[in-house]
Amino acid sequence: MTKKRKLIVAATAITIGAGSYFPASAVTLKGETASPGCPYTVFIMTAKYASKAGVNIQVSDGKTLTKSMLLMAQKKLDIASTVPAATVFMGKGVAMYKKLGKKAVAMHKKLRGMFSYQCGLYMMIVWDENKEIKTWKDLKGKKIFTGPPSGAAAKMSEDYIKAMTGYKPNKEYTAVRLNWGGGQDAMRNGQLDGYMRPLTVPSALMDELTAIRPVRVLSIGDDQVDNPVLAKVLAIPGRSMGALKAGTFKGVVNNNKDLRMPAFALSQQVGVHVPTDVVYKITKAFWSNIGEIHKNVPYLSGMTLKTALDKLRAPLHLGAYKYYKEQGINVPKALLPPEL
């Protein structure tokens, strides 16, 4: 269930201090992020440090980020976690934005970037006791969770499965689309044959499953590394080849060796309508506390100023641009604010 949170929510056991208070003059923004996980944690950290700079971000979680992007463009939302691939799709009016066409392209011009970050890996998880699924081809005829309805994650999952097997969703296998919480519940309760989703490393969600019984994670074999269809999937913005290092998860029976799988990145964006000084304050507050974030959230240790723009696919907001220029960060031409 979606919950409204003021920005002091302690998503990673970090608190602002006793009680909650915002200065009377604080600016208030509406924000959206996904269910608890990597983007949620980054967003909560953003909100926490923004509060100290006088910006109150009201956070609603459990959202479909592709829809959040539309709301930002309509000024119904100010700031949100976003997906690099979906940003590109929106700018072209394709994929989940196909029905909107040119309208989506126009709305894309209302979005501005803040930063991007590497988040985790796409994992195809099956219960080890299910001896019917040991290879990708064994997914034929099975019920597989691929992600939330209308989300970029479901498209990625289904593209990944197609690249590995040639199978199309709801033809060779049943693609089950539920919200993130519903997907986890369905896997936990034995209603799925397979569970495809992005996860951080380490992952509380994976630990929850392996506490029930062992699982197996299907990986990209040596014979698939040069697969041209897979190469196209990994070439989409925000995606790359990654690896789950041997011994990462004790309850994953085949994690006694490195397992290849897609890595994914996410980003954070604001509407172009948000004032420059406000976005500057948020950006500065976040990066000024990146050391504390690394200490408390180890899987974000690769998130640095030097990599902040690597996976971003929307031009920077003027406020973010101002901060990065002060820090001596080289901003690629494609990310320069059109307002300059």
Image (cartoon, helix red, strand yellow):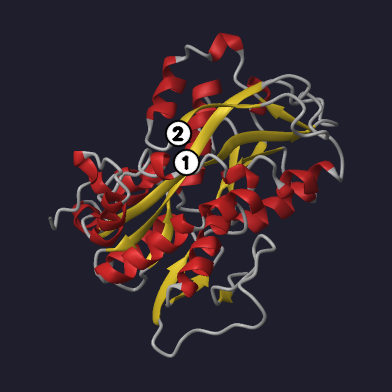
Q: Residue at x 78, y 25 (%)?
A: 132
Q: Residue at x 60, y 82 (%)?
A: 20
107 and 277: which is toward the camera: 277
Return the x and y of residue 254 as percentages of the image width and height. 77, 23
Amino acid residing under circle 1: Ala
21 and 142: which is toward the camera: 21
Tag shown at residue 90? none
Question: Helix, strand, or loop for circle 2?
Answer: strand
282 and 89: which is toward the camera: 282
Tell me: residue 115, above or below residue 118. Answer: below
Q: Which residue is mark 1?
A: 265
Q: Which residue is mark 2?
A: 239
Instruction: Determine the CA span between mark 1 and mark 2.
Output: 6 Å
Kindly tell me whether residue 274 is visible in this rendering: no
Return the x and y of residue 270 as percentages of the image width and height. 34, 62
Amino acid residing under circle 2: Arg
Return the x and y of residue 235 as percentages of the image width and height. 38, 27
Q: Residues within 10 Å of mark 2 (few under 14, many from 20)?
A: many
Q: Residues within 10 Å of mark 1 (few under 14, many from 20)?
A: many
Do tag 1 and tag 2 residues touch (Cβ < 8 Å)? yes
Question: Helix, strand, or loop for circle 1?
Answer: strand
294 and 177: which is toward the camera: 294
Determine the residue located farthest toward the left in the rendered image.
Answer: 340
Kindly tell me whether residue 79 is visible in this rendering: yes
Return the x and y of residue 140 as percentages of the image width and height. 63, 27
Image quadrant containing the C terminus = bottom left
